[in-house]
Image (cartoon, rainbow, N blue to C red):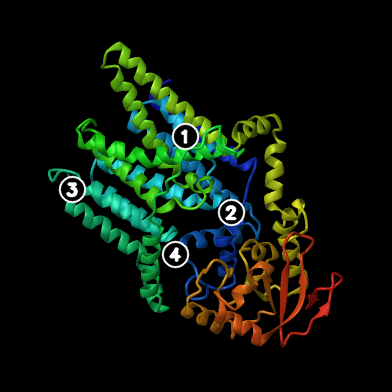
């Protein structure tokens, strides 16, 4: 069997394994329902920016809307999209690593680590957009041509439509990669940049026209720029070691190991390029990869590392694999003693990285694979049946209390076209209840779109909508008179407090009813319109 055939079969196998691995244990966190609940609004005739607030993800919402429509409002379509995208991303990690290192073993290592660190399903654009962009950049640098430059521009626009910030990162990396080429290439670098820019503008033009028509072009640009600047940060955290009083010290140090590995790898790679230690045939490729990794680390890593590191893992593992492979190969040119030192260091870093990834997933990845294989075919048919079921029924398998109880009440006591306002971060209740959110606000939380102008727009939308109930999580009640005082004043004027309940959970929820609505007490004592 030829090396090419082995390579192709490996890519197919990795894609299948990655998809199978995710499908056996699908996980949709509440963050996932941010864009899913907005996708349901789209299916009811609303659009981002014009009808509801969204921080720049029109294509993410649009793709989910199509998936929901095709899967009849279940999670099956969304699962196929997200898991398929991540599986393709893992496969491209294999392809890219093999292109950079020439080693099948390092390619398996990078792809395995990317899958095992378990990128969140809702972050599939970060995995897919970045790996496809790198693949296109590598293809262009290998053989520059106008069609390949156009593909780069088109994909950059697609990345921008998935997430505005991804488009910015790809633009910087792509332009740098193109300008690094020599003027005697088949396509002059400046001409290539022009092709990329024109193609990207053509692909993204309908979206910009739409923003201009709804009078939001300047606002979106301003908010996007402010968000990009505020997102830039570097986190410094010390290792704690086994002497720490924190029983979770091992997980904490695993996060630190991966964070610093991803943070310093681009700097080491760029240093190697500047010092002339990178082969000329791959030097420009390494610069592009390192710059993308650096941008992702600078702008995407914030807050909890365990939930953010998987977002940047795909390109970072490719770069780390290249660094380790290069160090190992260069050690063979030195004296035997230094060769063994370097080889030992490479093996140690690779092993610690694998252990750190497993620590972040609480060693579930290895167990999951074994358990899924042993339980075939039930390990596949069970999750598929659950994904095709009514999302609320499937969700209630974990219990009917707290926000699940809230979602059940919302569905049972209101009409499908009724809207709610929910103060607190609970985007999942709208999706599972199959109800719409009012005022263009999916949630009132952490100052999300709380400027006076945004609140006035929220109130103006509410004046033209039917929103019979406002639900306020007890701990968020001060926001009615504080962060969201303008919306709070509207609520107090047009709604009355009618109930408070915990839905048998740890949190309390205060329910306000519209003054013009007529409700009857349900069996639970809560107001009901049906």
Query: In what element is the residue under mark 1?
Result: helix
Quadrant (top left/top right/bottom left/bottom right) for the C terminus? bottom right
Q: CA distance from mark 2 to mark 3?
A: 40 Å
Query: Splitting the image into 4 quarters, where does residue 365 fall?
Result: top right
Q: Residue at x 79, y 81 (%)?
A: 519
Closer mark to the observer between disc 3 and disc 1: 1
Classify residue 363 as left or right of residue 281.
Answer: right
Give the residue number, with chain letter if any, for mark 1.
111
Query: In what element is the residue under mark 3?
Result: loop
Label 4 crowding class (10 Å Cα cut-off): few <14, some 14-19, many 20+? many
Give the residue number, with chain letter if any, for mark 4.
56
Name which of mark 4 and mark 1 comes first in the sequence.
Answer: 4
Q: Residue at x 76, y 65 (%)?
A: 502
Coordinates of residue 104 in the picture (x, y in percent): 41, 26
Q: Residue at x 46, y 64 (%)?
A: 58
Give the residue number, with chain letter if any, for mark 2.
78
Closer mark to the observer between disc 1 and disc 2: 1
Name which of mark 2 and mark 3 comes first in the sequence.
Answer: 2
Give the residue number, with chain letter if any, for mark 3.
187
């Amino acid at each position: 069997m030829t090396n090419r055939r082995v390579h192709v079969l490996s890519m197919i196998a990795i894609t299948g394994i990655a998809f199978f691995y995710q499908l056996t244990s699908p996980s949709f966190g509440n963050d996932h329902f941010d864009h899913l609940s907005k996708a349901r609004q789209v299916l009811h005739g609303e659009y981002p920016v014009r009808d509801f607030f969204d921080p720049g993800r029109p294509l993410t919402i649009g793709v989910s809307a199509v998936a929901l429509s095709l899967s009849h409002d279940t999670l099956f379509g969304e699962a196929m999209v997200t898991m398929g995208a991540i599986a393709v991303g893992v496969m491209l990690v294999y392809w890219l690593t093999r292109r950079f290192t020439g080693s099948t073993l390092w390619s398996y290592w990078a792809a395995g680590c990317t899958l095992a660190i378990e990128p969140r399903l809702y972050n599939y654009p970060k995995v897919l957009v970045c790996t496809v962009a790198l693949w296109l950049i590598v293809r262009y640098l290998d053989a520059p041509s106008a069609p390949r430059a156009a593909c780069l521009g088109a994909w950059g626009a697609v990345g921008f439509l998935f997430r505005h910030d991804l488009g910015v990162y790809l633009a910087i990396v792509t332009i740098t990669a193109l300008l690094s080429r020599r003027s005697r290439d088949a396509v002059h670098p400046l001409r290539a940049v022009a092709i990329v820019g024109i193609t990207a503008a053509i692909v993204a033009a309908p979206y910009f026209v739409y923003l201009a028509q709804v009078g939001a072009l300047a606002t979106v640009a301003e908010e996007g720029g402010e968000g990009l600047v505020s997102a830039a940060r570097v986190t410094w955290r010390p290792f704690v070691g086994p002497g720490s009083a924190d029983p979770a010290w091992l997980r904490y140090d695993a996060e630190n190991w991966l964070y610093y590995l991803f943070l310093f790898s681009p700097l080491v790679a760029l240093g190697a390029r500047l010092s002339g230690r990178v082969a000329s045939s791959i030097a420009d490729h390494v610069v592009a990869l390192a710059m993308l990794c650096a941008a992702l680390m600078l702008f995407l890593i914030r807050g909890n590392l365990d939930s953010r590191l998987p977002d940047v893992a795909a390109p970072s593992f490719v770069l780390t694999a290249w660094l380790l492979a290069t160090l190992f190969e260069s050690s063979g040119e030195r004296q035997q003693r230094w060769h063994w030192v370097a080889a030992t260091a490479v093996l140690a870093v690779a092993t610690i990285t694998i252990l750190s990834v497993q620590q972040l997933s609480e060693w579930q990845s290895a167990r999951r694979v074994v358990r899924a294989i042993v339980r075939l075919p039930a390990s596949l048919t069970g999750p598929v049946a659950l994904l095709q079921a009514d999302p609320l029924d499937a969700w209630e398998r974990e219990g009917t209390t707290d926000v699940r109880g809230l979602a059940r009440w919302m569905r049972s006591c209101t009409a499908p076209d009724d809207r709610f306002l929910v103060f607190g971060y609970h985007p999942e209740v709208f999706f599972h209840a199959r109800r719409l959110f009012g005022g263009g606000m999916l949630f009132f939380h952490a100052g999300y779109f709380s400027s006076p102008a945004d609140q006035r727009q929220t109130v103006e939308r509410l004046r033209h909508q039917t929103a019979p109930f406002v639900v306020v999580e007890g701990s968020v009640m001060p926001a009615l008179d504080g962060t969201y005082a303008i919306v709070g004043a509207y609520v107090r004027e047009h709604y009355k407090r009618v109930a408070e309940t915990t839905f048998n959970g740890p949190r309390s929820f205060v329910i306000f009813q519209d003054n013009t609505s007529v409700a009857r007490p349900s069996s639970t004592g809560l107001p009901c319109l049906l």
